[in-house]
Image (cartoon, rainbow, N blue to C red):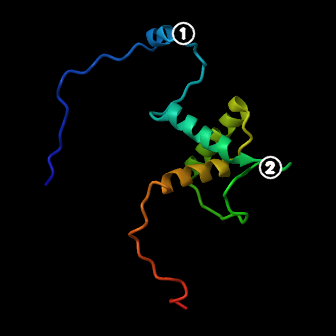
Amino acid sequence: MKKIIKESGPTQRPINSKLVAKALSAEDTGIQIDTKRGPISLFSLRRFLVDRLYSTGGRPKLKGTRKVRNKISFFDEDWEKLKAIAGYYKEKEGINVSSSQIASALIHAEISKIDTSKIKLKSRSASK
């Protein structure tokens, strides 16, 4: 049985963001993100989209994705979040991206962290 380690020392007082902004000569952007991983996650997602979105005159596409669309079922609350993120990028960043492209980028980012080299699958030709 593993022991759970709990921090019991004194907590540090929170950093005053206004003092940090003043020290760095930063200005408030007015963007409010209600998530623990918000700003960094949104920035890395933005970087991924900017690097891979391209247009040939129609709807922008993500480089490297399949031409055939796959159907994926989403939970309602997840689809609403994807629409909100796509709306944020369209309105605030000027990046014309769809909810499905946001989903594709997020799925790609998470799947790329999984090491599948040790997973053994039967080949399709053997099962026929």
* Image location of residue 102, percent across then percent down: 63, 47
User: Residue 108's image quarter?
Assistant: bottom right
Report crowding for label 1: few under 14, some 14 to 19, many 20 or more residues within 10 A (C-alpha): few
In the image: residue 96, left or right of residue 85: right
* Image location of residue 113, percent across then percent down: 45, 54
For the point 60% across and 50% down, the residue is: 105
Residue that protrudes farthest toward the bottom in the picture: 128
Quarter of the figure that contains the C terminus: bottom right
Report crowding for label 2: few under 14, some 14 to 19, many 20 or more residues within 10 A (C-alpha): few
In the image: residue 46, left or right of residue 110: right
User: Residue 93's image quarter?
Assistant: top right
What's the amino acid at mark 1? Answer: Ser
13 and 95: which one is in front?
95
Tag 1, which secondary structure? loop
Indicate which label's residue lies in the foreground, 1 or 2.
1
104 and 72: which one is in front?
104
* Image location of residue 125, percent across then percent down: 55, 88
Quarter of the figure that contains the N terminus: bottom left
Identify whether 127 is placed above or below 21: below
Q: Earlier in the sequence, mark 1 or mark 2?
A: 1
For the point 58% across and 13% down, the residue is: 27
Q: Which mark is residue 25?
A: 1
What's the amino acid at mark 2? Answer: Arg
Tag 2, which secondary structure? loop
For the point 66% across and 43% down, the residue is: 51
* Label 1 to label 2: alpha-carbon separation: 39 Å
Mark 1 in CB contact with mark 2 (< 8 angstroms): no
Q: Which residue is mark 2?
A: 59
